[in-house]
Image (spheres, grey):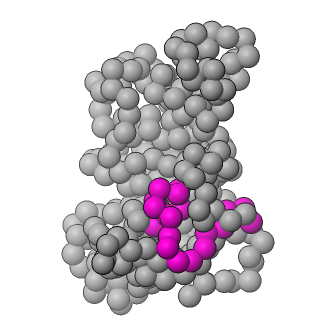
Amino acid sequence: MAHDNGRRDNYVLQCDNLSRWFGGIQALKNVSLNIEQGRIFGLVGPNGSGKTTLVNAITGFYPPQQGTITFEGQPLTGVRPHRIANRGIARTFQNVALFKGMSVLDNILMGRHIFMRPSALASLFYWWWAQKEEIAHRDKVEEIIDLLQLESVRDEPVEVIPLGLQKRVELARALAAEPRFLILDEPMAGMNQEEKEYIVRFILDAQEALNLTILLIEHHMDVITAICQRALVLNNGQEIAQGPVQEAVNHPDVIAAYIGGEVRDAA
């Protein structure tokens, strides 16, 4: 099902009939979605439903064996992950993937790596930090620190700050790559209610300030319904509902497969 609503020119990302097998197990079965420019699109489903496989297909880590992916009108299928990042797609990870032993500032700075010349990457980055031609990197990082209100922890080792702040640093590192399309993989995992509210606010602030299109993978249905315009619900690797967010999450098949169990608890 392509779910074409007649505004194809406005789609940033199009996935058409994606399928992916791992050995004898089909992890994705003919999954399609279209995400419009400037929208937040929700991707939900129980553990093992195919959410991560879909994201890994989009980002090039496990390309689909059937189907096509198009980003800003250009095919992504078969493009290598680093080239996909260079085209303007960034992601965060379900488990915090920050560099321990490095400061918040240096972790965010690592998000600039896609803009660095190989010679800069080969040297200690304290050297290139000081170089005149790298001022733009520093300016961009400072903008993001300000946007996500990380000034107070900028020089702290990343492993000593609370989880909620670590997740915000990971968001900042993704934003440092200047993406046009951002994939957030369960950004609220492990957070308390106050931390969830903070990260929702910063996601919305970043989307508005940077004109982002976002794919949000999330267990917390209250977050999905609060900030997403449309949603796709997966179960056992296939679509069970897709459409306007309230319509999708309240679909009888979704309630039967998903909401009655872990999502209601998580929300």
Kindly identify the residue that appears in the image at 44 percent across and 34 percent down: 169
Q: Residue at x 74, y 76 (%)?
A: 8
66 inside magenta stretch: yes
- Judge by depth and name the residue closer to the eye, 18 or 151: 18
Residue in the picture at 74% in, 83% down? 6
Instruction: Please state the horizontal and vertical placement of residue 128, each as a whole percent of the image.
Output: 61, 14
Q: Is residue 232 placed above or below 162 in the rendered structure? A: below
- Magenta residues? 54-73
Whether residue 140 is in magenta: the answer is: no
| Residue placed furthest toward the right | 9
Please state the horizontal and vertical placement of residue 25, each as a whole percent of the image. Answer: 31, 77
Classify 79 as above or below 118. Answer: below
| Quadrant, the C terminus | bottom left
Q: Is residue 125 left or right of residue 240?
A: right
206 relative to 135 in the view: left or right: left
Q: Position of residue 85 (x, y in %)?
A: 60, 47
Q: Quadrant of the N terminus?
A: bottom right
